[in-house]
Image: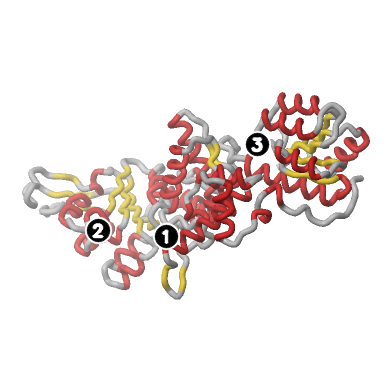
Amino acid sequence: MVHRLLIVDDDILHLESSQEFLENRGYVVDTSSTGEGAIEKVRANPYLYSLVVLDYRLEDKDGAAIAEAMTAINPDLFILMFSGDSSREAVLLSTRRGACGFVDKSEGAVVFLAEVAKWCKKFEQTTMTISTCQPLTDREILIQSIGMVGRSERLANIASTMQKVRSRSGSVLILGESGTGKELLARSLHRSDQGFFQAINCGAFRTNPQLMASTLFGHVKGAFTGAQNDKKGVFEEVQGGTVLLDEVDALPIPSQVELLRVLQERAVIPVGGTRETPVKFRLVAAAKPQLMESINEETFKPDLFYRISRIIVTVPPLRERPEDIEPLVRHFCKQWSEENGEQKTFLLSTIPYLQNYSWPGNVRELENVVFSLLDISTEDKISPKQLDAKFFEKQVAAPILSGQLLPLKERLERAERQHLITVLSLSRSLREAGRQMGVSASTVVRMLRKHGLKAQNFLTVEKNKGPQNGTLA
């Protein structure tokens, strides 16, 4: 993104030199030669600037007073002191009044440019949010055509396949983990079909095969206890539409045999009946990727597999397509805002933590997490500090030690350490870090000692400035 900066300096030659230096490197730069003028620019548009570069010694005001006035207008404003006065008093007073950093003018162009770039990056991380209004890319539009949300190449390839399949007859087998959107794909195929869409979860009938057969194929009056009237099965009810059989591998063998016959003959015989009834439908079967194991274990008939797998579509789990997480979060934020009449969103800096997580529940789990965070948050921007500890574990899979899961105490300590690092990197002082975690500054110090960490390696204002060389042109 292009960052807009405000430079404040009463040395006109230095002001113009700094402006030209930064504009030549892609920044948009406004200037002011007085403190009051700079404050008025911020007051007129508090969120316009990514960074204010402020001289400490000005004729009308000192930099600390200007920084204090600006942060009163926008507490999240980043202010970098850039001054020839680098006395201890100037540095301490500036940072206490709201400056995020201090660079001596004698340190030169390289150090100055690095500090500007660092704070602009920090602005992106702590202020920039995902946009719920940004235009969709061609790839996102293609994926949206099948009822899904994302931008990954793998989803786009699935969308292209599904568009081709829509106009063709024949069964489709969709393989994927729970929560990946198999039913959404099935519904996208139905859009070109006549009749109705009916989704049946075969796993719900594991303990009642008779009810399964009745649901699929129908029954005649008196076929079994409780069958008081004739009933059509779903293949007849959809009237030329689409039947989704989710968890198709849960079908008992007798129902598999009958389903195979229905697919071959395009006719059903209801339970307890003898007369065939012609049926017209598109079958979409869905199962987890382990379907082949059911064939090897002889709990799923190979003949039925060949019949339902004329076209196979495999939906990758969310952990294998992390680039889809940001558009999904954007989609869920928009949904939540429309339902609740409030505008809440996620900081861009929060997204990498979501991308690092393994998402065993896939998109369904992500949706639940996003809605939960939006529901309970008192802030309008979801930041990393609001995430659960599990999102700060670097490994995608559960940590393994000698073939066993790590003890709970060690897992919690790792999560605490990572959370501490994250909060410190977003804070300007130990006191601020403590406020974010709901503890005192002294408790933060004890946590640092416990985990063998040094505050200066993470706190924003205490980071090293780097090598000294070069001068401003």
Residue 231 visible in image: yes
Identified by mark 3, the residue type is: Asp
**CA distance separating discs 2 and 1:** 18 Å
Question: Is 30 situated above or below 466?
Answer: above
Q: Earlier in the sequence, mark 3 or mark 2?
A: 3
The residue indicated by pointer 1 is 312
Which residue lies at the image location 21% right of the left edge and 48% below the top edge? 233
Residue 110 is situated, as x and y percent measured from the top left of the image, at 84, 51
As helix, strand or loop, the secondary structure at mark 3 comes to loop
The residue indicated by pointer 3 is 76
Which residue lies at the image location 10% right of the left edge and 54% below the top edge? 272
**CA distance separating discs 1 and 3:** 51 Å
Residue 69 is situated, as x and y percent measured from the top left of the image, at 72, 29
Between 381 and 74, the one nearer to me in the picture: 74
Q: Which of marks 1 and 3 is nearer the N terminus?
A: 3
Q: Which of marks 2 and 1 is nearer the N terminus?
A: 2
177 sits left or right of 208 in the view: right
Between 466 and 367, the one nearer to me in the picture: 466
- Which residue of the protein is positioned furthest toward the bottom in this rendering? 402
Residue 156 visible in image: no
Q: For the residue carrying disc 3, how many other residues have a C-alpha within 10 Å: few (<14), some (14-19), or many (20+)?
A: some
Residue 153 is situated, as x and y percent measured from the top left of the image, at 56, 54
Identified by mark 1, the residue type is: Ile
Q: For the residue carrying disc 2, how many other residues have a C-alpha within 10 Å: few (<14), some (14-19), or many (20+)?
A: many
As helix, strand or loop, the secondary structure at mark 2 comes to helix
Asked if the residue at tag 1 contacts the one at tag 2, i.e. Cβ–Cβ closer than 8 Å, the answer is: no
Which residue lies at the image location 41% right of the left edge and 58% below the top edge? 176
Residue 115 is situated, as x and y percent measured from the top left of the image, at 77, 47
Question: Is 233 situated above or below 3?
Answer: below
The residue indicated by pointer 2 is 259
Question: Is 346 situated above or below 160?
Answer: above
